[in-house]
Amino acid sequence: LHKAIRRQRQMCIRDSNITAGFTRKGITFMHFILPYFIILLIVLQFAIKKGSRNHKARNEEFLDREAKANQVRRKDISNLNYISIPDNLPLINSGNETFDRLMSQDSRMKRAYDTLQSLKGKKILNLTGISNTDLKLSYGVANLNDLTEYDDNFTTLVKAIALIGHNLLEHKDIEDATTFLEYGISIKSDISSNYIDLAIIYASGDRKDQIAVLKEQALTLKSLSRDSIVSQLDAIMKK
Protein backbone atom coordinates (compact mmCIF):
# COMPACT_ATOMS: atom_id res chain seq x y z
CA LEU A 1 0.00 0.00 0.00
CA HIS A 2 2.82 2.39 0.89
CA LYS A 3 4.53 1.59 -2.39
CA ALA A 4 1.33 2.33 -4.32
CA ILE A 5 0.91 5.65 -2.51
CA ARG A 6 4.53 6.59 -3.23
CA ARG A 7 4.17 5.76 -6.96
CA GLN A 8 0.99 7.82 -7.13
CA ARG A 9 2.80 10.80 -5.55
CA GLN A 10 5.68 10.43 -7.99
CA MET A 11 3.27 10.38 -10.93
CA CYS A 12 1.50 13.52 -9.65
CA ILE A 13 4.85 15.29 -9.24
CA ARG A 14 5.87 14.27 -12.79
CA ASP A 15 2.54 15.46 -14.25
CA SER A 16 2.91 18.70 -12.34
CA ASN A 17 6.41 19.23 -13.77
CA ILE A 18 5.18 18.51 -17.30
CA THR A 19 2.30 20.97 -16.90
CA ALA A 20 4.65 23.60 -15.53
CA GLY A 21 6.98 23.04 -18.47
CA PHE A 22 4.21 23.57 -20.99
CA THR A 23 3.09 26.66 -19.11
CA ARG A 24 6.59 28.12 -19.14
CA LYS A 25 6.93 27.38 -22.86
CA GLY A 26 3.55 28.99 -23.55
CA ILE A 27 4.54 32.11 -21.63
CA THR A 28 7.90 32.23 -23.42
CA PHE A 29 6.16 31.88 -26.82
CA MET A 30 3.70 34.65 -25.99
CA HIS A 31 6.57 36.90 -24.88
CA PHE A 32 8.25 36.17 -28.21
CA ILE A 33 5.29 36.99 -30.51
CA LEU A 34 3.73 39.81 -28.47
CA PRO A 35 6.09 42.57 -29.75
CA TYR A 36 5.46 41.50 -33.37
CA PHE A 37 1.73 41.44 -32.77
CA ILE A 38 1.85 44.96 -31.35
CA ILE A 39 3.94 46.15 -34.30
CA LEU A 40 1.45 44.58 -36.72
CA LEU A 41 -1.44 46.39 -35.03
CA ILE A 42 0.44 49.70 -35.24
CA VAL A 43 1.20 49.20 -38.94
CA LEU A 44 -2.42 48.28 -39.70
CA GLN A 45 -3.71 51.27 -37.79
CA PHE A 46 -1.29 53.55 -39.66
CA ALA A 47 -2.34 52.08 -43.05
CA ILE A 48 -6.04 52.52 -42.24
CA LYS A 49 -5.53 56.13 -41.18
CA LYS A 50 -3.42 56.87 -44.27
CA GLY A 51 -6.02 55.30 -46.57
CA SER A 52 -8.75 57.32 -44.87
CA ARG A 53 -6.77 60.55 -45.30
CA ASN A 54 -6.08 59.77 -48.97
CA HIS A 55 -9.75 59.00 -49.61
CA LYS A 56 -10.79 62.20 -47.90
CA ALA A 57 -8.25 64.20 -49.93
CA ARG A 58 -9.43 62.66 -53.21
CA ASN A 59 -13.05 63.31 -52.31
CA GLU A 60 -12.31 66.93 -51.44
CA GLU A 61 -10.37 67.36 -54.69
CA PHE A 62 -13.28 65.91 -56.68
CA LEU A 63 -15.82 68.16 -54.96
CA ASP A 64 -13.59 71.17 -55.55
CA ARG A 65 -13.25 70.38 -59.28
CA GLU A 66 -17.01 69.76 -59.54
CA ALA A 67 -17.74 73.11 -57.90
CA LYS A 68 -15.40 74.88 -60.34
CA ALA A 69 -16.82 72.97 -63.32
CA ASN A 70 -20.37 73.95 -62.43
CA GLN A 71 -19.35 77.61 -62.63
CA VAL A 72 -17.89 77.43 -66.16
CA ARG A 73 -20.00 79.24 -68.73
CA ARG A 74 -21.08 77.81 -72.06
CA LYS A 75 -18.29 77.75 -74.66
CA ASP A 76 -18.41 77.37 -78.42
CA ILE A 77 -18.44 73.69 -79.40
CA SER A 78 -19.15 74.15 -83.09
CA ASN A 79 -15.55 73.45 -84.09
CA LEU A 80 -15.04 70.18 -82.24
CA ASN A 81 -13.93 67.07 -84.11
CA TYR A 82 -17.38 65.88 -85.15
CA ILE A 83 -17.64 62.50 -86.87
CA SER A 84 -19.36 62.17 -90.21
CA ILE A 85 -20.69 59.01 -91.82
CA PRO A 86 -19.22 58.69 -95.32
CA ASP A 87 -21.23 58.03 -98.45
CA ASN A 88 -18.93 55.20 -99.57
CA LEU A 89 -20.34 52.68 -97.07
CA PRO A 90 -22.31 49.91 -98.83
CA LEU A 91 -26.00 50.66 -99.30
CA ILE A 92 -29.07 48.54 -99.81
CA ASN A 93 -30.06 48.12 -103.47
CA SER A 94 -26.64 49.19 -104.69
CA GLY A 95 -26.02 46.01 -106.68
CA ASN A 96 -24.57 43.73 -103.99
CA GLU A 97 -26.86 40.71 -103.80
CA THR A 98 -25.19 39.25 -100.69
CA PHE A 99 -25.53 42.54 -98.83
CA ASP A 100 -29.19 42.94 -99.87
CA ARG A 101 -30.02 39.35 -98.91
CA LEU A 102 -28.51 39.70 -95.46
CA MET A 103 -30.40 42.91 -94.86
CA SER A 104 -33.68 41.23 -95.78
CA GLN A 105 -33.03 38.06 -93.76
CA ASP A 106 -31.24 39.29 -90.63
CA SER A 107 -33.42 41.62 -88.54
CA ARG A 108 -30.55 42.63 -86.23
CA MET A 109 -28.39 43.62 -89.16
CA LYS A 110 -31.25 45.58 -90.74
CA ARG A 111 -31.84 47.46 -87.48
CA ALA A 112 -28.13 48.27 -87.29
CA TYR A 113 -28.23 49.51 -90.89
CA ASP A 114 -31.30 51.67 -90.19
CA THR A 115 -29.60 53.04 -87.08
CA LEU A 116 -26.59 53.95 -89.18
CA GLN A 117 -28.76 55.82 -91.67
CA SER A 118 -30.61 57.68 -88.90
CA LEU A 119 -27.33 58.90 -87.41
CA LYS A 120 -26.31 60.68 -90.61
CA GLY A 121 -28.34 63.71 -89.62
CA LYS A 122 -27.06 63.84 -86.04
CA LYS A 123 -23.97 65.21 -84.36
CA ILE A 124 -21.48 62.57 -83.24
CA LEU A 125 -18.45 62.96 -80.96
CA ASN A 126 -16.02 60.43 -79.55
CA LEU A 127 -15.62 61.54 -75.94
CA THR A 128 -14.49 58.18 -74.58
CA GLY A 129 -12.41 58.50 -71.42
CA ILE A 130 -13.44 62.10 -70.69
CA SER A 131 -15.38 62.56 -67.46
CA ASN A 132 -18.42 64.79 -67.08
CA THR A 133 -16.39 67.04 -64.80
CA ASP A 134 -13.72 67.49 -67.47
CA LEU A 135 -16.38 68.17 -70.11
CA LYS A 136 -17.92 70.89 -67.94
CA LEU A 137 -14.51 72.43 -67.21
CA SER A 138 -13.63 72.48 -70.91
CA TYR A 139 -16.94 73.46 -72.50
CA GLY A 140 -19.24 74.73 -69.76
CA VAL A 141 -21.96 73.05 -67.74
CA ALA A 142 -24.67 74.23 -70.16
CA ASN A 143 -23.16 72.08 -72.94
CA LEU A 144 -23.05 68.86 -70.91
CA ASN A 145 -26.38 67.44 -72.03
CA ASP A 146 -25.61 68.08 -75.71
CA LEU A 147 -22.11 66.59 -75.43
CA THR A 148 -23.49 63.54 -73.65
CA GLU A 149 -26.00 63.06 -76.47
CA TYR A 150 -23.28 63.34 -79.12
CA ASP A 151 -21.15 60.80 -77.25
CA ASP A 152 -24.12 58.43 -76.96
CA ASN A 153 -24.53 58.75 -80.73
CA PHE A 154 -20.92 57.64 -81.11
CA THR A 155 -21.50 54.57 -78.95
CA THR A 156 -24.57 53.68 -81.02
CA LEU A 157 -22.61 54.18 -84.24
CA VAL A 158 -19.63 51.98 -83.39
CA LYS A 159 -21.89 49.18 -82.15
CA ALA A 160 -23.85 49.25 -85.43
CA ILE A 161 -20.67 49.31 -87.52
CA ALA A 162 -19.14 46.37 -85.63
CA LEU A 163 -22.31 44.29 -85.90
CA ILE A 164 -22.71 44.86 -89.65
CA GLY A 165 -19.03 44.20 -90.31
CA HIS A 166 -19.07 41.00 -88.25
CA ASN A 167 -22.14 39.61 -90.02
CA LEU A 168 -20.72 40.43 -93.44
CA LEU A 169 -17.50 38.64 -92.52
CA GLU A 170 -19.42 35.57 -91.36
CA HIS A 171 -21.18 35.43 -94.73
CA LYS A 172 -17.91 35.81 -96.65
CA ASP A 173 -18.66 39.31 -97.97
CA ILE A 174 -15.09 40.31 -97.26
CA GLU A 175 -15.00 43.49 -99.33
CA ASP A 176 -18.02 45.12 -97.69
CA ALA A 177 -17.00 43.85 -94.25
CA THR A 178 -13.61 45.48 -94.69
CA THR A 179 -15.19 48.78 -95.70
CA PHE A 180 -17.36 48.93 -92.58
CA LEU A 181 -14.69 47.70 -90.19
CA GLU A 182 -11.99 50.04 -91.49
CA TYR A 183 -14.38 52.95 -91.07
CA GLY A 184 -14.91 51.86 -87.47
CA ILE A 185 -11.19 51.91 -86.85
CA SER A 186 -10.84 55.33 -88.49
CA ILE A 187 -13.24 56.88 -85.95
CA LYS A 188 -11.44 55.13 -83.05
CA SER A 189 -14.07 52.55 -82.22
CA ASP A 190 -13.37 50.69 -78.98
CA ILE A 191 -15.49 47.65 -79.88
CA SER A 192 -13.27 44.56 -79.61
CA SER A 193 -14.89 42.67 -82.50
CA ASN A 194 -14.21 45.58 -84.86
CA TYR A 195 -10.46 45.10 -84.35
CA ILE A 196 -10.47 41.31 -84.19
CA ASP A 197 -12.66 40.80 -87.27
CA LEU A 198 -10.53 43.18 -89.31
CA ALA A 199 -7.37 41.47 -88.07
CA ILE A 200 -8.81 38.12 -89.21
CA ILE A 201 -9.42 39.58 -92.67
CA TYR A 202 -5.87 40.96 -92.82
CA ALA A 203 -4.39 37.66 -91.62
CA SER A 204 -6.30 35.66 -94.23
CA GLY A 205 -4.88 37.94 -96.91
CA ASP A 206 -1.32 37.69 -95.55
CA ARG A 207 -1.36 41.34 -94.50
CA LYS A 208 0.06 41.01 -91.00
CA ASP A 209 1.73 44.39 -91.35
CA GLN A 210 -1.77 45.86 -91.26
CA ILE A 211 -2.47 44.02 -88.01
CA ALA A 212 0.55 45.77 -86.51
CA VAL A 213 -1.01 49.08 -87.57
CA LEU A 214 -4.27 48.00 -85.91
CA LYS A 215 -2.35 47.30 -82.71
CA GLU A 216 -0.79 50.76 -82.75
CA GLN A 217 -4.24 52.29 -83.11
CA ALA A 218 -5.62 50.09 -80.33
CA LEU A 219 -2.86 51.28 -78.00
CA THR A 220 -4.19 54.84 -78.32
CA LEU A 221 -7.64 53.89 -77.00
CA LYS A 222 -8.75 55.34 -73.69
CA SER A 223 -11.29 52.64 -72.90
CA LEU A 224 -11.06 49.59 -70.62
CA SER A 225 -11.15 47.25 -73.63
CA ARG A 226 -7.73 48.42 -74.87
CA ASP A 227 -5.53 45.81 -73.18
CA SER A 228 -7.83 42.95 -74.18
CA ILE A 229 -7.87 44.11 -77.81
CA VAL A 230 -4.08 44.43 -77.93
CA SER A 231 -3.65 40.97 -76.41
CA GLN A 232 -5.96 39.39 -78.98
CA LEU A 233 -4.22 41.17 -81.85
CA ASP A 234 -0.86 39.88 -80.60
CA ALA A 235 -2.27 36.34 -80.59
CA ILE A 236 -3.47 36.68 -84.19
CA MET A 237 -0.07 38.00 -85.33
CA LYS A 238 1.69 34.99 -83.78
CA LYS A 239 -0.36 32.44 -85.69
Image: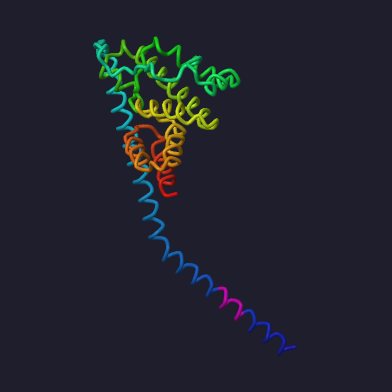
Could you say which is closer to the camera, residue 24 or residue 181? Answer: 181
Splitting the image into 4 quarters, where does residue 230 fall? top left
Residue extending farthest front: 95
The percent position of residue 139, horizontal first and vertical second, equals 26, 16
Q: Nearer the viewer, residue 176 or 121?
A: 176
Q: Main secondary structure of the magenta part?
A: helix
Q: Nearer the viewer, residue 224 or 44?
A: 224
Instruction: Give left or right: position of 9 versus 189.
Output: right
Residue 81 forms part of the magenta stretch: no
Residue found at x 28% / y 19%? 81
Displayed quadrant of residue 58: top left
Residue furthest to the right: 1
The image position of residue 192, as x and y in percent, is 44, 34
In the drawing, does residue 126 fall left or right of residue 15? left
Q: Is residue 222 left or right of residue 118?
A: left
What is the tally of numbered marks visible in this picture? 0
Q: Residue 95 appears at what percent x and percent y?
A: 49, 18
Tell me residue 203's x, y (percent): 43, 42
- The stretch of residues the image draws in magenta is 13-19
Q: Residue at x 75, y 88 (%)?
A: 1
Q: Is 91 rendered above or below residue 212?
A: above
Vertical placement of residue 91 versus 218, above or below: above
Which colouring convention does the figure follow?
rainbow
- Residue 142: name its quadrant: top left
Within the magenta stretch, is there residue 14? yes
